[in-house]
Image (cartoon, rainbow, N blue to C red):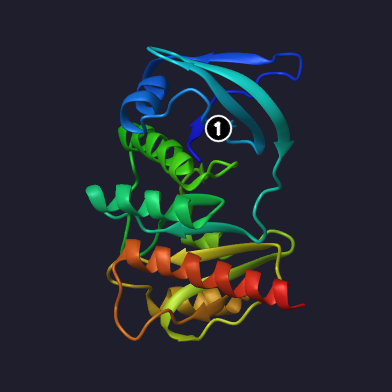
């Protein structure tokens, strides 16, 4: 089912909606949707509305059907990572959004200090929106402010901190509602950073037998953690 991202879901008193511009052109020309097809409207804040196309010419004319609110995914994954350069950052953001990460934020470490500028942040916001539509996410992944390593290893109440490192152990579920995953730069974390993370109570986890690029490690960590946490919850 095709998904359209709106700034806001129309109120319950509205029974029709006209969609114009790029969203309409994409649905009509690329997806080739026609009268009678059903769409899913989302606002990125958990609100969902099913709609039926009543006309598809230049604009989309929609009849609004049932509305609902979807809960955000639990556990909420906050992924803090070094920032890959060039198109690798775009790829990482797209993948993390598809996987179901709640928040990504750039993290400065001893071997990696790449702070994305305003232009990159704007581009990432567009990638998040497109990825949410492709993945049919009701909640948009958030792009948060940069964080230092020292702040990243300081957990909020009830939050579990995981640091991806070859010296770590295979991942096992924690049952935590909020999990922060730390992914280092290509050079990895320093001995001092690993020691500080352990002292702060972080768990070190090993993702793979080989050294991974930042974007690969981020996607692998998010997938492994979400899969194992959701599997453990379904079995309980």
Residue 184: % across, % down:
38, 67
- Dividing the picture into quadrants, the one containing residue 74 is bottom right
Of residues 58 and 116, the one nearer the viewer is 58
Residue 2: % across, % down:
48, 37
Of residues 112 and 50, the one nearer the viewer is 50
Residue sticking out furthest to the front? 36
- Residue that appears at 47% across and 39% down: 133
Number of numbered discs: 1
Left or right: residue 21 versus residue 68 is left
Left or right: residue 214 versus residue 163 is left
Left or right: residue 127 versus residue 55 is left
Residue 142: % across, % down:
53, 43
- Residue that appears at 73% across and 36% down: 68
- Dividing the picture into quadrants, the one containing residue 117 is top left
Residue 180: % across, % down:
57, 62
Q: Quick one: quadrant of the C terminus? A: bottom right
Find disc 1 in the rendering and name its residue: 38
User: Considering only vertical position in the picture, is 28 above or below 220?
Assistant: above
Q: Secondary structure at mark 1?
A: strand
Residue sticking out furthest to the left? 86
- Residue that appears at 71% across and 72% down: 234
Binning the other alpha carbons within 10 Å of mark 1 as few (below 14), some (14 to 19) or many (20 upward) gives many
User: Considering only vertical position in the picture, is 180 above or below 85?
Assistant: below
Of residues 136 and 105, the one nearer the viewer is 136
Left or right: residue 164 versus residue 10 is left
User: Considering only vertical position in the picture, is 210 above or below 200?
Assistant: below
């Amino acid at each position: 089912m095709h998904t359209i991202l709106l700034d806001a879901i129309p109120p319950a008193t509205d029974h029709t909606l006209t969609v114009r511009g790029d969203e309409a052109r994409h649905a009509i020309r690329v997806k080739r949707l026609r009268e009678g097809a059903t769409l899913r409207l989302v606002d990125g804040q958990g609100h969902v509305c099913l709609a039926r196309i009543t006309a598809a010419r230049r604009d989309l004319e929609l009849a609004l059907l049932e509305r609902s609110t979807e809960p955000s995914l639990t556990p909420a994954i906050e992924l803090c990572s070094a920032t890959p350069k060039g198109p690798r950052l775009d790829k990482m953001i797209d993948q993390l959004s598809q996987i179901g990460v709640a928040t990504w934020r750039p993290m400065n470490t001893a071997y990696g200090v790449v702070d994305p500028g305003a232009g990159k942040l704007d581009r990432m916001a567009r990638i998040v929106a497109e990825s949410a539509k492709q993945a049919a996410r009701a909640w948009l992944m958030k792009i948060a402010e940069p964080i230092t390593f020292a702040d990243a290893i300081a957990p909020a109440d009830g939050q579990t901190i995981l640091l991806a490192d070859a010296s770590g152990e295979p991942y096992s579920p924690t049952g935590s509602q909020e999990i922060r995953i730390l992914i280092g730069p290509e050079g990895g974390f320093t001995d001092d950073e690993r020691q500080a993370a352990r002292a702060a109570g972080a768990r070190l986890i090993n993702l793979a037998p080989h050294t991974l690029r930042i974007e690969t490690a981020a996607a692998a960590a998010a997938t492994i953690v979400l899969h194992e946490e959701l599997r453990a919850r379904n079995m309980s």
